[in-house]
Image (cartoon, rainbow, N blue to C red):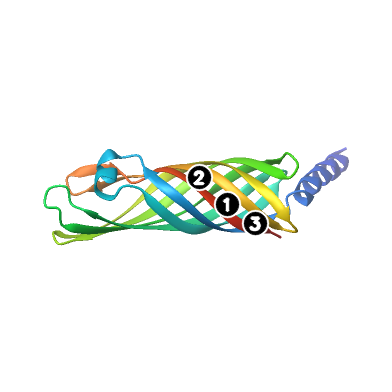
């Protein structure tokens, strides 16, 4: 009895892994609309560039790892001096993907680690912090293994800068071009 249960569980696991053999590599570009009004007042929104790797682990369940880069110049609110901002989010999490023909829809969540650097005549600020990210999207399978990914992410990371806290996350809407191996 015990041996037959092990065999049945092994067959179920192997059948799930056989469907999970996807490995997807993407280059991505998106527009970041920051959640925090103070952030938008100085820098507004802007383009982020990066990439993501997804690995299928079980019948539509994937693990993803990704990173991106945001850079923007702005003006300090009171002195109107130029300030430059750089944000590097790196993260990972899980996604659930299901196919509807030529489209694959997905929903996911994960954790990001943020490197924040701001430079202006008053001084430089460099901070690190952790945050959350949620994602939804749709991949269009173009031809062969090539795909186009249209997605929306919401990120949240609150950092304490000087004597105030600010959320450096927001809504990201973008496109990815990738290949499924």
Name the element at disc 3: strand
Q: Can see residue 83?
A: yes
Closest to the camera, between mark 2 and mark 3, is 3
Name the residue that disc number 2 marks.
110
Q: Locate residue 172: give its quadrant.
A: top left
Q: Give the alpha-carbon distance from disc 2 to disc 3, as whole Å.
A: 17 Å
Reply above or below: 99 against 120: above
Percent position of residue 129, x then y: 35, 50
Mark 1 and mark 2 in contact? Answer it, CB < 8 Å: yes
In depth, the one of 65 and 16 nearer the eye is: 65
User: Residue at horizontal 79%, vertical 51%?
Assistant: 18
In the figure, is residue 152 to the left or right of 89? right
In depth, the one of 78 and 10 nearer the eye is: 78
Name the residue that disc number 3 marks.
24
Name the element at disc 2: strand
Q: Earlier in the sequence, mark 2 or mark 3?
A: 3
Q: Earlier in the sequence, mark 1 or mark 2?
A: 1
In the figure, is residue 40 to the left or right of 24? left
Name the element at disc 1: strand
Q: Quadrant of the N terminus?
A: top right
**Most distant residue in the left direction:** 79
Q: Earlier in the sequence, mark 3 or mark 1?
A: 3
In depth, the one of 157 and 70 nearer the eye is: 70
Q: Report the disc number at residue 64.
A: 1
Percent position of residue 134, x then y: 50, 40
In the figure, is residue 94 to the left or right of 162? right
Report crowding for label 3: few under 14, some 14 to 19, many 20 or more residues within 10 A (C-alpha).
some
Report crowding for label 1: few under 14, some 14 to 19, many 20 or more residues within 10 A (C-alpha).
many
Q: Give the alpha-carbon distance from disc 1 to disc 2, as whole Å.
A: 9 Å
Percent position of residue 92, x then y: 52, 51
Q: Can see residue 125?
A: no
């Amino acid at each position: 009895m015990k041996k037959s249960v092990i065999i049945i569980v092994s067959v179920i696991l192997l059948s799930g892994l056989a469907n999970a053999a996807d490995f997807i590599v993407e280059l991505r570009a998106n527009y970041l609309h920051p959640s925090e009004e103070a952030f938008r007042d100085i820098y507004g929104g802007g383009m982020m560039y990066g990439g993501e790797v997804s690995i299928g682990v079980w019948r539509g369940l994937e693990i993803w790892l990704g990173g991106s880069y945001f850079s923007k110049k702005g003006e300090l609110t009171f002195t109107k001096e130029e300030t430059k901002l750089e944000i590097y989010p790196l993260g990972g999490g899980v996604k659930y993907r299901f196919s509807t023909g030529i489209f694959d829809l997905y929903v996911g969540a994960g954790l990001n680690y943020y490197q924040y650097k701001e430079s202006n005549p008053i001084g430089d600020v460099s901070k690190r912090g952790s945050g959350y990210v949620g994602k939804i999207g749709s991949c269009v399978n173009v031809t062969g293994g090539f795909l186009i990914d249209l997605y929306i992410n919401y990120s949240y990371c609150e950092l304490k800068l000087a004597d105030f806290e600010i959320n450096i996350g927001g809504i990201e809407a973008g496109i990815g071009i990738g290949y499924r191996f």
